[in-house]
Image (tube, rainbow, N blue to C red):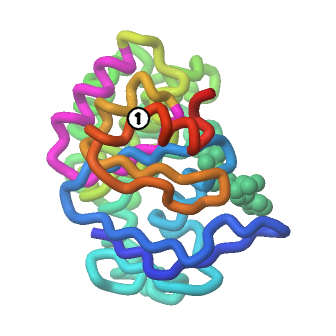
Amino acid sequence: MFDIRNVTLKREANTVFENLNLHIGAGEKVVLLGVNGSGKSTLLKLLNGLEFPDSGELLFEGNPLSKSALKQKQTNEYFRRNVGLVFQNIDAMLFNPSVYDEIAFGARQLEFDDVDARVRNYAELFGLTPYLKNVPFKLSGGQKQKIALACVMSLSPKVLLLDEPTSALDPASTAKFLDIIAALPITTITATHNLAIAPRLGERVVILDEKGKILYDGTSENAYEIDLLTRAGLII
Ligand SMILES: Nc1ncnc2c1ncn2[C@@H]1O[C@H](COP(=O)(O)OP(=O)(O)O)[C@@H](O)[C@H]1O
Ligand SMILES: [Mg+2]
């Protein structure tokens, strides 16, 4: 699904990634762990074509994922339709006058012919049906997070990139969300520093150290060792 080859990315004085290599296969469920500032959000933005490497190469389904590739209308539409990112900062995603319009936005842009059915289906899935006429930015943090999830999922993408997707959800909503993700037969890459939910988000775990280097890439079974998590700075 994705190939990150020798990617180096610098922002201001920071080297966020240096010679990063990562392959993500179709259908994999990847948990991305790392302390604040380790590069989780930047990595998800790279995979969503919102950030580009200073050097190295990024491939999506074997094709270059670059600024120039995304300038082609057909490539751009295919990519945007199939790779959805739920931002860590949800407020940056919401701008429509109603929850209905917010969830419908992407499907309308992509000219789907079943916009209404998609909106109602995903609103129901996230318990948002009573709020369809509400103004998104006036809802609670958790409700906004659910709207953002509904927006992205309603496009039936091949890949979901989730940046701290449960940070504002209450325990019951979190449990429900984990079930939804586990049942989705698509590629998901979820960044979190919540070790309580991480094991339920995927079988493959990638741990970044504070310098954006891959400290661990392997099965869930061996990922949650005290030594490793201490080296990652995730526990003390
Ligand atoms: N636009 C930017 N300008 C300067 N530095 C940035 C920018 N975006 C991210 N960084 C830096 O990159 C590093 C990784 O940030 P981020 O990807 O947000 O980490 P995480 O999501 O793991 O907390 C941090 O040191 C951060 O300060
Ligand atoms: Mg982040």
Magenta range is 173-193
**In the rendered view, would you say 129 is above or below 123?**
above
Q: Quadrant of the C terminus?
A: top right
- Residue 38 coordinates in the image, percent (x, y): 63, 51
Q: Quadrant of ligand 2?
A: top right
Is residue 76 at least partly visible in the picture?
A: yes
- Residue 186 coordinates in the image, percent (x, y): 20, 51
Image point (57%, 43%), residue name: 231
In the figure, is residue 49 to the left or right of 157? right
Q: Any magenta on residue 187? A: yes
- Residue 160 coordinates in the image, percent (x, y): 34, 50
Q: Which quadrant of the structure image shows residue 93?
A: top right
Q: Quadrant of the N terminus?
A: bottom left
Q: Which quadrant of the structure image shows residue 172?
A: top left
Q: Secondary structure at mark 1?
A: loop
In the figure, is residue 88 to the left or right of 1? right
Image point (40%, 39%), residue name: 103
Image point (50%, 70%), residue name: 49
Is residue 95 at least partly visible in the picture?
A: no
- Residue 228 coordinates in the image, percent (x, y): 48, 42
Farthest residue, direction front: 227
Disc 1 packing (10 Å; few <14; some 14–19; many ≥20)? few
Q: Amino acid at mark 1?
A: Glu
Q: Any magenta on residue 19? A: no
* Residue for badge 1: 225
In the figure, is residue 86 to the left or right of 25? right
